Image: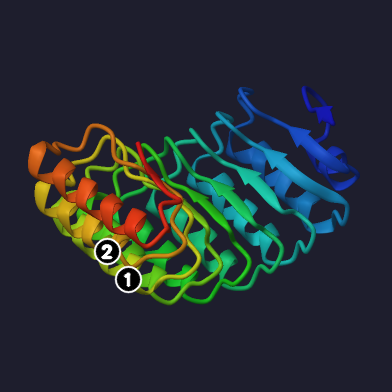
Amino acid sequence: MGNILYGDLYDRVRSASGTYLLQSQFIGPKRAQDAANGLKENCTLLMLNFYRSAVGDVGAQAIADALKVNSTLTWLNLSENNIGDLGAQALAEALKVNTALTTLHLGRNNIGPQGAQALADALKLNKTLTALHLDSNRIETAGAQAIADALKVNQSLTEIDLQSNRIGAGAGQALAEVLKVNQALATINLNINKIGEAGAEAIADALKVNRTVTTLHLWSNEITQPGTRAFAAALKTKLECNEADWVVI
């Protein structure tokens, strides 16, 4: 493991192996481009952490270009980097062709419905990504509905984090439809949204037939007694079928 503080990021990333950390350093877009150019030529690096590095859309676009040719990186953290829809769209294009990346962190950025739509389109094609973290963005109901539509097709993603994204009941109902057909998702985080009673009841009903979800986070979603009763009924159904292998948090 290395910690890049100074020097030529191109050379350092190009020759890195294992895990490299760039987090909490003001790398900025230009140096992010240098790092991305190094990533294009690297064939040993597995994990790269850009957390809180101020790469912005320009840096994200450069990193996306690198992901189109890099075939070894499996884990990438771009959380809290002021990445908006343009950066998300570039990363989505990379995901359509990349066959190595399994985990992508994009939390705490400025990704809206358009960026979410682009990522959703990529999920329909990508077969290697297993975890996507989009927490604390602003994809809203429309963006979550687009992702839900993609998850009816995608069968590789096992973990999706949509916490704190201004998601309403309509998206909850769309995700419920996903749970009826998707056979891969195991962990879903919908904390701090506005799923409400209608969304909660739809999700609870879908869990009665779902066989893969083991953890569902729904804290702070304007869910009261009708919603909790719906989950209790779903749990009862699972217990009767000896399938109570999930938890709602």
Left or right for 42, reference 110: right
Q: Earlier in the sequence, mark 1 or mark 2?
A: 1
**Quadrant location of the C terminus?**
top left
- Residue 196 appears at what percent x and percent y? 13, 45
Q: Which mark is residue 180?
A: 1
Q: Nearer the viewer, residue 50 or 54?
A: 50
Left or right for 218, reference 225: right
**Quadrant location of the N terminus?**
top right
For the residue carrying disc 1, how many other residues have a C-alpha within 10 Å: few (<14), some (14-19), or many (20+)?
Answer: some
Q: Nearer the viewer, residue 153 or 140?
A: 153
Secondary element at tag 1: helix
Q: Is residue 204 above or below residue 189?
A: below
- Residue 41 appears at what percent x and percent y? 84, 57
- Residue 172 appears at what percent x and percent y? 22, 55
Per the image, the residue denoted by label 2 is 206
In the image as oriented, which residue stretches furthest toward the right? 15
- Distance between the alpha carbons at the discs numbered 1 and 2: 6 Å
Left or right for 141, reference 210: left
Q: Is residue 124 above or below residue 62?
A: below
Whether pointer 1 and pointer 2 mark residues with C-beta atoms closer than 8 Å, the reply is: yes
Quadrant position of residue 15: top right
- What amino acid is labelled 2 in the image? Ala
Q: Is residue 245 above or below residue 32?
A: below
Identify the residue at horizontal 36%, vertical 37% (top origin): 136
Q: Is residue 132 visible?
A: yes
Q: Nearer the viewer, residue 20 or 199?
A: 199
Q: Nearer the viewer, residue 152 or 22?
A: 152
